[in-house]
Image (cartoon, rainbow, N blue to C red):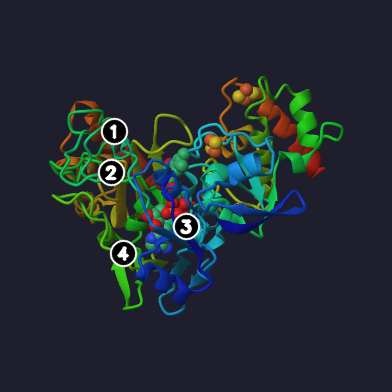
Amino acid sequence: MTPVKLRVNGSTELLELDPRVSLLDALREHLGLTGTKKGCNQGACGACTVLVDGERIVACLALAVQYAEREITTIEGVGQPDHLHPLQEAFVREDGFQCGFCTSGQICSALGMLAEHRAGMPSVVTPHLTDDEIALTEAEIKERMSGNLCRCGAYEGIVGAVQSVAEEMSQ
Amino acid sequence: MRAFGYVSAPDLPTALGAVAAGARPLGGGTNLVDLMRDDVERPETLVDVTALPLAGVDELQESGGLRIGAMVRNSRLAADRRVRSRYPVLAESLLAGASGQLRNMATVGGNLLQRTRCPYLRDHAAACNKREPGSGCAAIDGIHRGSAVLGTSEHCIAAHPSDMAVALVALDAVVEVQSLRATRRIPLAELHRPPGDTPHVETDLAPDELITAVELPALPVARTSRYRKVRDRASFAFALVSVAAALEVRDGDVVDVRLALGGVATTPWRAREAERVLLGAPATEETFRRAAAAELASAISRPQNAFKVELAQRTIVATLRRLAAERADDAEGGPA
Ligand SMILES: Cc1cc2nc3c(=O)[nH]c(=O)nc-3n(C[C@H](O)[C@H](O)[C@H](O)COP(=O)(O)OP(=O)(O)OC[C@H]3O[C@@H](n4cnc5c(N)ncnc54)[C@H](O)[C@@H]3O)c2cc1C
Ligand code: FES
Ligand code: FES
């Protein structure tokens, strides 16, 4: 067992963890933050996406011990049922989910993705890699969100939700 | 997963000491943790190297190239302005790999040393000479749609999975490797070993060696370069075939060219045969076809992956055609 100080959603948690425990299991099993979902546990579905220092990662392939002292944000830190984040509202408005299993990962991923876009980072569908301003087209959103699978196939709504919030944020 | 010890290395001497004592380097963990969970990798101790001060991309003053720290994450490298303008093939190869989340975790060192996605590596019920030397290769007479057609042996036909490595081998990258004993520089083209009769020996690295940097030479031809990846779905999938190409055409002739292939070979594959055909020849469709055919002439395919031979040739021709057209546009002052 190793003492691990995890900073999650603004509070600091002291845990005693076996180094084998993934960040995902630490969040769900040890801290009771079950908003973050476990889908494939292999990095292939995006359900476990959380933000670390504002960047999106998959928590299933992350060892919790590796993320001590970093600023971790889960869906519980993004918004609350009585106080939704604008992106969560947009998911409801645009029909961005059915069963909701992939939604927390989609939302954390979208927040990370929008920050990457604001920082000028390109994607593989960016027409000119050297452009300073990259238009956040539907093709860009789809490519940048491709690490998050939705078994219900709510993709159209997800793209719509991300698009509308990206517009709000840029206004 | 089996139990293991964990240490985090704040500096290089600590990390080198740990690997000398038998610890296994842990980068983003996106390949190693996954394989440990499947009981394919069984390290007794992990040393987290991601905090090492090797996360910068620096100009090489003498040569005009770039030095990329081994801990630079894939997303950061792809976004680097100098990489985007001077080595677009590298940025594109990174952006075509994995997902945004994984690229934020994956490091340069870890990406180079990721292991094959051949399903038999993880299937403990099947033979795999990489997982269990001497057990055989289940892919040869099994599911081998994704397997290699170049650089194979009768002991292993697993394809090398890294996109970034294909771009780097085209760019004549050099890998810097350190241990407590020495610092070595290995051309990337020599880092990965073809399977031969020891498929489990995948690289030229000793267990106590750490990758510390990758160096790119100044390479004017790389300004006109592209990475083209063909896969089963448009995104978030490994390559069936990929082509990294850089091309310079003057007065209608190829005056400089770099070509490498992914998805079709057991190592990141520098296409030297094709380069030989192309260099000095007219930049025409006919030359591109001859070059592609020359490279794939030594391919050994099997029923399910025979399509890769044709697909690789078409992808080479299409990529060169596009680069030649872009260059022509450039010369006329049109869009780059
Ligand atoms: C779902 C999924 C899809 C993917 N799709 C693609 C794809 O399309 N294209 C592609 O190229 N890749 C793809 N990948 C693979 C991914 O790019 C690699 O897992 C990643 O690059 C590995 O980097 P890492 O830092 O996480 O390595 P780790 O998993 O930390 O390490 C990998 C290996 O490298 C060793 N190592 C790490 N750093 C060093 C060092 N500095 N010196 C010596 N040894 C070191 C480790 O000991 C280990 O053996 C995919 C992965 C997943 C899970
Ligand atoms: S649970 Fe982490 S990516 Fe699927
Ligand atoms: S809403 Fe059901 S998986 Fe996406």
At horizontal 64% and vertical 39% (from top left) the residue drawn is A28
- Judged by depth in the image, the label closer to the viewer, 2 or 4, is 4
- Judged by depth in the image, the label closer to the viewer, 4 or 3, is 4
- Judged by depth in the image, the label closer to the viewer, 2 or 1, is 1
- 2 and 1 marks on the same chain: yes
Q: Are marks 2 and 1 in contact (CB under 8 Å)?
A: no
At horizontal 34% and vertical 40% (from top left) the residue drawn is B117
Query: From mark 3 to mark 2, how far is it between C-alphas?
Result: 44 Å
- Kind of residue at badge 1: Leu
The answer to whether the beta carbon of the residue marked 3 is less than 8 Å from any atom of ligand 1 is yes
Query: From mark 2 to mark 1, how far is it between C-alphas?
Result: 19 Å
Q: Are marks 4 and 1 in contact (CB under 8 Å)?
A: no
- Kind of residue at badge 3: Gly
Mark carried by residue B27: 3
At horizontal 33% and vertical 68% (from top left) the residue drawn is B208
Tag 2 secondary structure? loop
Query: From mark 4 to mark 3, how far is it between C-alphas?
Result: 15 Å
**Residue assigned mark 4:** B207
Mark 1 neighbour density, 10 Å: few (under 14) some (14–19) many (20 or more):
some
**Residue assigned mark 2:** B284
- Kind of residue at badge 4: Pro
**Residue assigned mark 1:** B311
Q: Are marks 2 and 4 in contact (CB under 8 Å)?
A: no
Furthest residue to the right?
A82
| Tally of numbered tags | 4
- Kind of residue at badge 2: Thr
Tag 3 secondary structure? loop
Query: Of marks 1 and 3, which one's residue comes earlier in the chain?
Result: 3
